[in-house]
Amino acid sequence: MTYQYWHQDIETMPRPELEALQLTRLRDMIAYSLRTSFYAPRLHAAGIKGPEDLKTLDDLKRIPFTTKDDLRAGFPYGFLSIPKEEVIRLHASSGTTGIPTTIYFNREDLHHWTSYVARCIYGTGCNHTDVFQNMITYGLFTGGLGFHAGGEEVGMLVIPSGSGNTTRQFRLMQDFGTTVVHATPSFLLHVESIMRAEGVKRDSLKLKRAFAGAEPYSEDTRRRIEGLLHIDVYNSYGLSEMNGPGVAFECQCKDGLHLWEDGYIAEIINPDTLEPVRDGETGELVLTILCREATPILRYRTRDLTGFYTEPCACGRTHRRIRRITGRSDDMLIINGVNVFPSQVEEVIMAMKEVGNNYLIEIEKDGVLDRLTVKTEVGPATFMDDSRLLNALKERIRKTLQASITINPRVELHESGSLPVSEGKAKRVYDKRPKDV
Ligand code: DLL
């Protein structure tokens, strides 16, 4: 197989050079971090007063980890390291409560992010002759604009279709001869079932490839999508705190995701002891961003569980590969690609005085998509036979939850004291989706 590289010199850079580049860039990030109200005191406490205090990459370990809670506590500007006037974009993602984590970009930062996404796309064999339909949410979520910019950088014709509206997606594919799509794996499965239901003929489509990510999925799911749609599916990993998509991606070997080490320093730690795991072992991925002036983030605990491959890849890239993400070390749920913390649901429910103390969160498969049901007890003063009042309450809970978590849940009201109460630590989340990872 012949492999194509977007930045061949960087993608195949010998490791010693790559690590030297990481150190130079890390020092730059230290200089920017020292300008933030969050990192300045932390770095000083670690004895780091300037970039020159980092002599080797190993010195990174002197810096404490950063968590999602730290980002929330620093909302809105605790991590901003440049004057506000120089910021040209922000993205945000959900936190464990209503406070989002917000990332700022200057022009240079967006340029870097775009070039990483372009590198991912091109590395799967795409080029400027492709027609790329970006079937993922645009907006504060990074998947839409991130891939949009990367696709344009490669020179593809980019169709900003966004997610949903499957019938219209087929029209666009047929009208413009779409060859590549980007979506969550669950939406790709949904597309396939609608395709069958609506009798859309596979040979009316020119599809060749799909990029699928933003949520975990198994190798079996990948094969299923590939088999059903007759396309190549590439796994795409990223997170808002590290720009969004474009952190790690599969090459044409489809055997692990190359993590772009000129843009990120990756560590894998045991989430309990916080010590590094042995090479190849599974642990929590910790990332430091190397090319973002507006919002540097050092040693971010992603909570994603993975491990490094120890063998080099046949494609010749020297950037290490991580394994498919198998789970998280916290309680974050990913429901149809949207991140939801159980605490967000609790916050909404507990703020309503008509609602009782007990609630449950249930996630099931509804066809290929996920369905969220929130079951809650009404308070003792609410009568279960007043159906008008109950319906109004249900609707208010549904709408408030939707505003907070951006997905539309089913809401069930139960009589006070009727939901099961677990002894000891409450078990409130029932994730009934098949675990096939
Ligand atoms: O999901 C960014 C993204 C957009 C990645 C489009 C890929 C494609 P967040 O909303 O901040 O950002 O969610 C990040 O989603 O920490 C993982 O838990 C999960 N995740 C993302 N990609 C994958 C993947 C975007 N390929 C969180 N496999 C991450 C498993 C994934 N989990």
Image (cartoon, grey):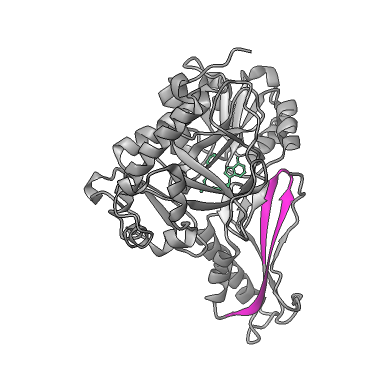
Residue 311: say if magenta. no
Q: Quadrant of residue 252?
A: top right
Percent x, y for residue 229? Answer: 70, 26
Percent x, y for residue 36? Answer: 30, 56
Residue drawn at the location 44% of the way across and 28% of the way down: 17
Percent x, y for residue 280? Answer: 66, 41
Is residue 367 placed above or below 236 in the rendered structure?
below
Q: Quadrant of residue 237?
A: top right
Residue drawn at the location 23% of the way across and 50% of the way down: 83
Q: Residue furthest top?
A: 2
Is residue 361 placed above or below 424 in the rendered structure?
above
Is residue 318 placed above or below 343 in the rendered structure?
above
Percent x, y for residue 102? Answer: 40, 53
Residue 291 seen in this snapshot: no
**Residue 233 vs residue 163, the one in the foreground:** 233
Q: Quadrant of the N terminus?
A: top right
Residue 330 seen in this snapshot: yes
**Residue 426 vs residue 36, the one in the foreground:** 36
Residue drawn at the location 76% of the way across and 75% of the way down: 420
Horizontal side of 246 relative to 293 (left or right) equals: right
Is residue 409 placed above or below 298 in the rendered structure?
below
Q: Quadrant of the C terminus?
A: top right
Most common secondary structure along the magenta stretch: strand
Residue 371: say if magenta. yes
Question: What residue range appears in magenta?
Answer: 354-374
**Residue 3 vs residue 358, the one in the foreground:** 3
Total tally of numbered discs in the picture: 0
Q: Residue furthest front?
A: 55
Horizontal side of 250 relative to 40 (left or right) equals: right
Ligand 1, image quadrant it occupies = top right
Residue drawn at the location 70% of the way across and 80% of the way down: 385
**Residue 250 vs residue 282, the one in the foreground:** 282
